[in-house]
Image (cartoon, grey):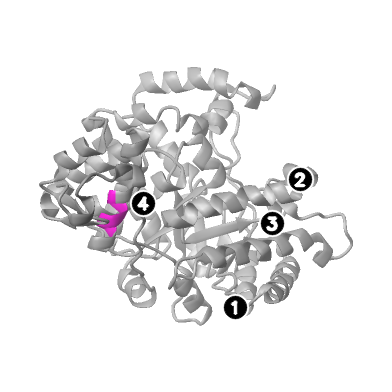
Amino acid sequence: MIYESTYELRQDLKDAVIVKGDRVEVVDLAKLQAHGIDILARSATFGTEPVKAFARWMIWEIGQVLGARPASIHEFYIARGRNEWKDATVPAMNIRFTAYDTVRAALRAARKTNAGALIFEIARSEMSYCELPPAEYSAMVIAAAIKEGYFHPLFIQGDHFQVKAAKYKTDPEGAIKEVKDLIKEAIPAGFWNIDIDTSTLVTLEPPTLEEQQYHNFTRSAEITKFIRDLQPAGVTISLGGEIGEVGEKNSTPEELDAYIENYNKTLATLGDYAGLSKISVQTGTSHGGIVLPDGSIAKVAVDFDTLGILGQRAREHGTGGAVQHGASTLPEDYFNKFPEVQTLEIHLATGFMNLFLDHPAFPASLTEKLHKFLDVAAADERKPNMTDAQFYYKSRKKAMGPFKPEMWALPSETKATLYQALEDQFAFFYKKLNVVNTRDLIDRIVTVVEYHQPKPASTRVAGDDLGLAD
């Protein structure tokens, strides 16, 4: 059901949760988990604009009451730099499709494995083509936690908050402003983990590494100050820097030194601000993998030795270590190696979408509709030498937003099969990356603050301030 007014929504939920002024009260958790949170998640995604805003606010406030709260992983990562824990690699998982049900599967796997060191993220580009703005994405993560009874810190991350190189060449301040505007939208929505990606600004022509990294470290420091000035009281947002564009040449220790040393010097001139908790590097992978003509993924060589060296160098500079991007399509026997070389964090995205869309249970008729859509909407991405398999593989992420209603409306039997497969895949990664049994460690190290969002002004009704509206 899609509600036309917040009044209708509130009336349907009043047996489970009620609104009292600017706060909510959960009156029946079982009813909330049985159906109420499903209603809120759907309303937060497909409702009218006032209903969306109100549902997202309710989900946030219910999360505050129950303990499903956004948090920063900064303290946990800095603790790694002090060797308070080791031999684990935190999965940062890009959830591009049916965010509510997919995060539910991930959290069911987390509960079964007692995993707490995990991140849900979405990149700047994904927010656009997946039609998942920050407020909706965080609402889906929190709603999923409420549904599954996962009342622990939720690490929600802005992946690749990237400065566009082409725009920067002609309008540098405009390019930076675009990222800052996104940050201003994301932080109030609970994105308390942000990857600052100014690696696109690296220029290889100058003779010294400092000159090559100049725009990267100066703009990264500038954006750090901007974020620190906006972060909520009691929260130190986890920030990541990046020294190499994913899919390009492998990073070197000397590049890392040039970036982080000059970043720290630049940041110190801007004020007394906490710096980075991690650094993303390039060691041989690419986003989505390298697609062969038959649609399969080429096996690539990850330079684990270099990754280990870069991680140690990053820790020597006061961060928690190095981050590996573009990894979800790697061979399964690679993943246990990341904790072995002390990789701090690994980004997983395309593999989940591949499992979902290529699963035998996914309706063939819907696949056909996706392909027909892409033939038109993504026609400019089809290269002359591409096979159909390569084209659809590379472009189908662009259908995740336009086909959001169809994805949500899959038959219940189909959904049960697909999300069980995803749950099993999440559990596989948690085990391989050795984040099982990390929940108590997270709860001990990470500070979780109570943070209330302002109630949407358009949803106030007579008697609200007295708690009489319900």
Q: Marks 1 and 3: which is nearer the front?
A: 1
Pointer 3: what residue? Answer: 244
The residues tagged by marks 3 and 4 sit, at their Cα atoms, a distance apart of 27 Å
Q: In this view, does 22 lie to the left or right of 293?
A: left
- Disc 4: which residue: 426
Horizontal arrangement in the rendering, residue 366 relative to residue 159 (left or right): left
State left or right for residue 347 relative to residue 206: left
- Whichever of callouts 4 and 1 sits on the residue coming sooner in the sequence is 1
Q: Would residue 334 be visible to someone looking at this image?
A: no
Q: What is the x, y in percent for residue 466?
A: 18, 56
**Mark 4 to mark 1 CA distance (whole Å):** 30 Å
Q: In which quarter of the image is the N terminus?
A: top left
- Pinpoint residue 313: horizontal percent, then vertical percent: 65, 74
> Which residue in the protein does label 1 denote?
318
Residue occupying image coordinates x 47% and y 78%: 79
Categorize mark 3 by other alpha carbons within 10 Å: few (<14), some (14-19), many (20+).
many
Q: Does the magenta stretch include residue 122?
A: no
Q: Nearer the viewer, mark 2 or mark 1?
A: 2
- Which residue sits furthest right? 207
Would you say the magenta stretch is mainly helix, strand or loop?
A: helix
Which contiguous range is marked in magenta?
A: 58-63
Which callout, 3 or 2, points to the residue nearer the camera?
2
Question: Label 2: how many residues lie within 10 Å, few (<14), some (14-19) or many (20+)?
Answer: few
Q: Label 2 near label 4: C-beta < 8 Å?
A: no
The residue where tag 2 is placed is 171
Mark 1 and mark 3: Cα distance apart in space? 19 Å
Q: Which amino acid does label 3 sit on?
A: Gly
Q: Nearer the viewer, mark 3 or mark 4?
A: 3
The residue under the point 49% across, 81% down is: 83
* Residue with the most extreme front position: 462
